Image (cartoon, rainbow, N blue to C red):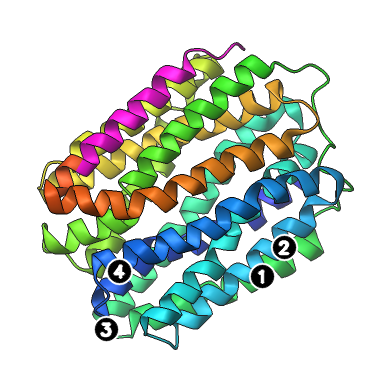
Amino acid sequence: MRAHNRYILVNSITGFLYFFVLISPLYASEVGISLSEVGWIFTIVYALQAILSYTVGRIFERFPPGIGVILGKLIYSLGPLVLAFKYQMKWFATAQVAAGFSDVFFPSQVLYERAIIPADIREDVYRKMVVSAEGVKIFFLIFFAFTYLKGLGTYRALFLSMFLGAIVYVMAFLSLLPRVKTGMEGASKAHDKSSLLYIYMSQLFIFLSFNFASWMIVSYFLKEVLKGDQLQMFYFEMFFSGSVIASYFVFRKVSEKMSLKWKFFVGALLMSGYFFLIAVPDLKFFYFSHILVGTGFLTWLPAKETLKFQAAPEKLGRWEGFFQGVNIFSRIIFPPLSVLVVRAFSYGTVFVIGGLMALSGAIMALGVRE
């Protein structure tokens, strides 16, 4: 099995590890931590991450990026482990700091992927990476939905399994994947910094939209407005994962006829529609919005990463680190700000603002040259 295929297999574990982002805000609400308290916790956590991200990106231009990937997952594993046994607010904050290191070290993952994924099949590889990760996620969603119905302590089981999943990821990474000497391997000889800037700005606006109308807001919206519970959190993630997998097969032929630039634009446009739909306080719209964002995400991300690597210079780590740092810095401002908007206006207002940000990202995509 070629290196990029082994990477798809190992990366599929991250589909399950992402659960931490989804369920930790809902967990906080269940144990009595208020929305305002959670907002300030996330602000402090993201301040630390933003400072470190750019530095990490530059370091792993010169050093083996695989080391950064491993360090990120090892530190992340401590987050779910803590929450499996501790319930107080100080431990919730500690767990978020630990889990956030997966984002801090994300630039090293991008550099590693550039080195091991052949340039001529990058879009296809990224598409398969997304589908395989969502396939793993939906398997565990079904499993935990059934165990919850039987009365198992869902949160503890999830957090412990995330800890074990991160350890399995690290062991598989070390044993199955090749070593990469520096983060400059696999760089394209030609680069287009103007297009690269448009790509990163478009990506940033998409990330900003999800940071403002974050999973924290979505989970409290589900509980406070739609009167849902953690089981419905599982259900709507099934809609997202299912739409990713279905769109891979249903729209594959249509996608082949579109240019990378238009897939980048259309995917962002579909994701912006998610925010406008979820703003309607109705469970039917809530579920349908996740089908829309799943289809958009599978269209957008493979095109974005392929375009990025085509346009990027050797020293991509500092670009990735800088924009990841800006992305994380926005999470410092947005949690308390989005809470203020909820309290002053409504959850729907937060989602509409998020939709306008995502729409701006789609417009930015039109500036990219292939």
Q: Is residue 102 left or right of residue 336?
A: right
Q: Report the residue at 29% width, 37% height from top.
A: 354
Where does the magenta region start and end? 350-370
Q: State the SS at label 1.
A: helix
**Distance of mark 4 from mark 3, alpha carbons?**
32 Å
**Which residue is tagged 3?**
150
Q: Could you tell me if the residues under marks 1 and 2 are in contact, i.e. CB atoms within 8 Å?
A: yes
Q: CA distance from mark 3 to mark 1?
A: 32 Å
Q: Is-magenta flag for residue 178?
A: no
| Residue indicated by mark 2 | 70
Q: Are marks 1 and 4 in contact (CB under 8 Å)?
A: no
- Mark 3 or 1 closer to N-term? 1
In the image, residue 133 lies at what x, y percent? Answer: 52, 52
Q: Residue at 49% of width from left, 23% of height from top?
A: 264
Residue beneath label 1, please?
A: 74
Separation of residues labelled 1 and 4 (CA atoms): 27 Å
Disc number placed over residue 37 in the picture, else none: 4
Residue 138 in the image: above or below residue 188: below
Question: In this rendering, would 145 be left or right of 177?
Answer: left
Regarding mark 2 in the picture, which secondary structure is present there? helix
